[in-house]
Image (tube, rainbow, N blue to C red):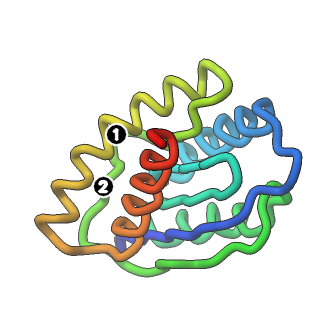
Amino acid sequence: MTRWAVAYASTAVAGLAVADLDRLLVDARAHNHLEGVTGVLLHDGRRFFQYIEGPEGSVARIYARIRASRLHVELVELQNGPVEQLYFTRWHMGCSHTKGSVLQTLSSRQWRQEARYLHEDVARTGEAPGLRELLAFWERQQEAADA
């Protein structure tokens, strides 16, 4: 079985509410679980960054759903190809958006812990340009929140 990963950035549609993000997160977790796909979704209030991974065919089906979503525009693909290892095997979809619901807050807490380990893995292996972009997006979010 070929391990596959897709990373992309996109712009959230105007007027996206907290409830919309909750539905997106629940829907993504359910579909990803059924397909055996894991990953993380970062949202900074305006932009999305997502990294998904798993079996090639499953990732392709989930990515097709993502591309068809009406919750975002201007999708820019950053990575779409085979990877040597999976990084998010313990969870089906994390989220970093914290200004909102309890679901998003819990997902955010989980992502903060995962991001620490991911930094170490990426520094050690140098693999996956999508992971480097994911961490850069996260760091920009943190810098903006601290400012």
Residue ranking furthest to the top: 102
The residue sitting at 60% across, 49% down in the picture is 43
Q: Percent x, y for residue 44?
A: 60, 49
The residue sitting at 40% across, 63% down in the picture is 136
Badge 2 vs badge 1, beta-carbon distance below 8 Å:
no
Q: Is 61 rendered above or below residue 24?
A: below
Q: Is residue 65 left or right of residue 128?
A: right
| Amino acid type assigned to the residue bearing label 2 in the image | Tyr
Residue ranking furthest to the left: 124
Secondary structure found at label 1: loop
Crowd rating for badge 1 (residues with CA inside 10 Å; few <14, some 14–19, many 20+): few
The residue sitting at 35% across, 49% down in the picture is 88
Crowd rating for badge 2 (residues with CA inside 10 Å; few <14, some 14–19, many 20+): many
Q: Percent x, y for residue 104?
A: 59, 29
| Amino acid type assigned to the residue bearing label 1 in the image | Arg
Write down the residue under mark 2: 87
Q: Is 142 rendered above or below residue 133?
A: above
Q: Percent x, y for residue 132?
A: 34, 68
Compare residues 117 and 67 and report the one nearer the observer.
117
Q: Percent x, y for residue 53?
A: 43, 61
Secondary structure found at label 2: loop
Marks 2 and 1, Cα distance to the nearest angstrom?
Answer: 9 Å
Q: Is residue 24 left or right of residue 136?
A: right
Q: Is 134 rendered above or below residue 33?
A: below
Quadrant in the picture for the N terminus: bottom left
Compare residues 67 and 112 and report the one nearer the observer.
112
Compare residues 79 and 35 and report the one nearer the observer.
79
Q: Please give the label number shown on residue 90.
A: 1
Q: Please give the label number shown on residue 6.
A: none
